[in-house]
Amino acid sequence: MAGNAFLDRLKRGPGGPGQRSPLQRILYWSVVAGVWGLIFLVVFFAVFARDLPDTSALYDIDRQPSVTYLDRNGALIAVRGSQQAPPADLEALPDYVPAAFIAIEDQRFRWHPGFDPVGMVRAMVANMRAGRVVQGGSTITQQLAKNLFLTPDQTLRRKGQELMLAIWLEMKFSKDEILALYLNRVYFGAGAYGIEAAAQRYFDKSAKDLTVGEAALLAGLLKAPSRYSPVSESERAAARATVVLDEMEESGVITPEQRAAAVLEPVRVSRTLATQHAQYFVDWLDKEIRGLVGEPTEDLIVETTLDLTLQTAAERAVSGVLRENASRGVEQAALVALDGDGRVRAMIGGASYADSQFNRAVDARRQAGSAFKPFVYLTAVEAGYTPQTPVVDEPIRIGSWEPRNYSGRFIGRTTLSNAVAQSTNTVAVSLADSLGRDNVARTARRLGITSRIGLEPAMALGAVEVSPVEMAQAYDAFANGGKRVTAYGISRIRTREGRVIYQRSARESRPIQAIANPPLLYMNEMLRGVITSGTARSVAISGRDLAGKTGTTSDYKDAWFVGYTGGFVTAVWVGKDDNTAMRGVTGGQAPAAIWRAFMTAALPRLDAPRIPDGPPLPEGWQPPDPVGELIGSMDDPYVDEIERGIQPTPERREPERPSPDQPVIRPTTPQPERRDPEVQRPEPGLPPEKKADPLFF
């Protein structure tokens, strides 16, 4: 009642109603604002304080087990999960280290009460102008509150709780204590939590020994650790560190001379830290580890098959060729290299892991183009064809579909070997049609293709969506003596104490003979011809026994080269994620250039032998006689006259070679029953594959 009387007196004023003095008006509206402010605070706490996390566990570290990945020689690839070093003492750090984080993250840190109204308004205005979130208004204290107690969800409720916890932290701790907690808990990428772990991970030194440039680089990482990684995104990281140095100079943390010296002094990243491109490989293994040992409950060490030296060579080859071909629309690439037993030695899943974590080497399914044709030709040689078997490149029609060659013309009579080397479409389609496309599909599956294979006529030209890792393991049978392998990347998993949890067994690694002889000899002979005289002449490396096949799909949407030497195969794909066309890029160009650049660097390290001959040849087998086979395939021009009792005259015996327009007859070896394409059906249980356009080579 007394409060009401006081308000009434303020309302009336000394001269009656409406006669308040200026002081009374100020007091009146102050009381009103205070009451509404109190109501707002009560409502605010009632709404946002519910389910507020328990702050009693502030100093407890809920550390998830770490998984350390090593390459085949024991070099570090990556660390997943939490990796924390002992907390850094803020007083032991050079002044410019914490100052770098304040300069770029929260310049009013020393003066605000946990939240920064000026920063919030500035960020709100910038975001409204841009139409999207381009700035954040969170202070270091708010970021600490989020990291310690909250989830990363971007909801109004979570932001309200973050604000309350930030004020609580400011009331409970000094500014230095808050800054120390922040620096020792924040994530710096590469599995490093806290500035001490980050300094050791990136620079092989303690945080107290960081230089001005190194401090600026670490401070710049916090915006997006993967995107600004000094390992895989060095240019971006350098640009971000320069921004931090500018802010440090502007705020008086360092002098212009110190800034100039920091720019000139190179920042060297630890040699033991693997490149971010190897993270595609780690992502691939991460899922497998859970299947082998379950969810980790203790720190693990995974010994892998990767060779970091070869991985680095692959990264350089991919990045260099992508830069050179950017103007032609080449945006993405994938590479998988396997040894003869299926061990993954290198894997590139895309142009930049920081920009996209989608692993195109494993998870992308793209049309194989003519890189699929070896499965057609293997089916043919297993049915009795040889490299010298005569075939005809001529127009062919199956239903309403008429495939065409890349050259737009037909050369007529040729050999099977030349058809492979020149990637002749009509011959591949004709063979698949006569041999049975279901038989071709079985051949591809036998060698390692696991994706769905439709039985449409265009499948002979690679209208089949496959991944680079599938193509590599399928071609490995040509490289290793005819054995089917499965690509793998884990050799052993152990604890830090040395207890072995998983060891790849000899039974798992035992290859299965998938190609017999002479078909293997024939295939290697023909696929060598692709490099010596065919569509992949650009990949030839002097003194090396190489074979392989190019592939280009319709409208240049996908381009491949899969090549091999003795016991080592590499599959390369280039294209665009949106499946639009590149500008005239074929398998013999950008993919072949990547393959050659990588193999040129890899072959000296591999010391690979020539391509092995494979299993023993059948007893009594003789190499085919090209001339005899050609003559044996011809019709006898006098057979009709002999049957009618007419003896040929000497003049009529004179020609010993067939005329140019004489038809070529297929070998008389038993052929599989021809299947009518109209009665073939896709594999059971799978939706029909979309019909593809004619493919090139």
Image (cartoon, rainbow, N blue to C red):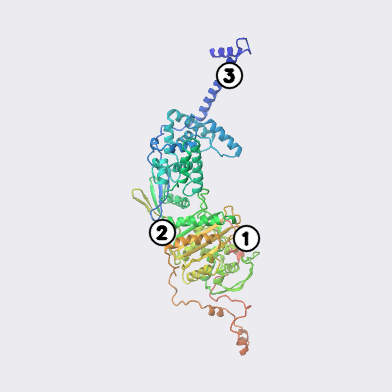
Return the x and y of residue 213 as percentages of the image width and height.
45, 43
Q: Amino acid at mark 2?
A: Glu
Mark found first going from the N terminus, 3 or 2? 3
Q: Amino acid at mark 3?
A: Trp
Q: Which mark is residue 508?
A: 2
Return the x and y of residue 556 as percentages of the image width and height.
60, 59
Mark found first going from the N terminus, 1 or 2? 2
Q: Which is nearer the eye, 419 or 437?
A: 419
* Residue sitting at the far top: 15
Q: Is residue 119 above or below residue 572?
A: above
Q: What is the spatial separation of the Cα atoms under label 1 and label 3, in whole angstroms? A: 77 Å
Q: Residue at x 49, y 48 (%)?
A: 234
Return the x and y of residue 42 as percentages of the image width and height.
52, 25
Q: Which mark is residue 29?
A: 3
User: Relative to residue 570, is residue 301 drawn left or right?
Assistant: left
Local secondary structure at mark 3: helix
Residue indicated by mark 1: 693
